[in-house]
Image (spheres, rainbow, N blue to C red):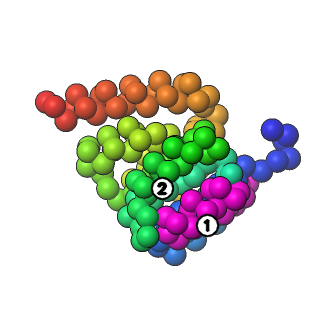
Amino acid sequence: MADNERRRVLVVDDEPDVLLLCRVNLEFEGYDVIEASDGEDALAKVRAHHPDVVLLDVMMPKLDGWQVLEAIKADEATRDIPVVILTAKVQDQDQIRGWSHGAADYITKPFSPLALSQVLQDVLATAPEEEERRRRMILEKLELLQNN
């Protein structure tokens, strides 16, 4: 990717305040931001714009974030797009579900805009093989914690 190319982020959330917070902070960091406010719109925009990364809320109308994540990862054309889950759901089983369905990372609300940018930088800099290894390791740890 050339230095002058901006990374494209699709931010998916049904809360206008969250969309605005993400847009302002990510554009400030140099990202091109696309927004979607429900799961169906998110899938349409993933297919139309092929973003570099998706920031995805879980609790949304039409299709929830889990359904969107599964659809992205099931499609040959989009499966390599990293998806970062952004949600208020902080239970171990929710995190296990996200990691096991292919999430690249998991951010819980409320979140720091500075942390958001760092997570996206880390996700975008990670090779797919390394992402898979990291995801398996996190899943194993979460499952161990849940079983104890």
Which residues lie in the magenta part? 25-49
Query: Which label is found at residue 68?
Result: 2
Name the mark nearer the viewer: 2 or 1: 2
Q: Residue at x 49, y 28 (%)?
A: 132
**Residue sitting at the far left:** 148
Residue 26 is one of the magenta-drawn residues: yes
User: In which quadrant of the rendered view does residue 148 lie?
Assistant: top left
Residue nearest the observer in this picture, 132 or 74: 74
- 129 up-or-down from 4: above or below: above
Which amino acid, mark 1? Glu
Percent x, y of residue 32 = 72, 58
| Residue 100 percent location from the top left of the image | 38, 37
Q: What secondary structure predominates along the stretch shown in magenta?
A: helix
Q: Which residue in the protein does label 1 denote?
A: 35
Residue 140 in sight from this viewpoint: yes
| Local SS, label 2 | helix
Position of residue 51 measured from the top left corner of the image (x, y, whole percent): 67, 52
Q: Earlier in the sequence, mark 2 or mark 1?
A: 1
- CA distance separating discs 2 and 1: 14 Å
Residue occupying the point 31% across, 27% down: 140
- Magenta span includes 109: no
Question: How crowded is the residue under tag 1: few (<14 C-alpha within 10 Å), some, or many (20+)?
Answer: many
On the rendered structure, is 5 left or right of 91?
right
- Which residue lies at the image location 47% right of the left edge and 24% below the top edge? 133
- Above-or-below relation of 61 to 9: below
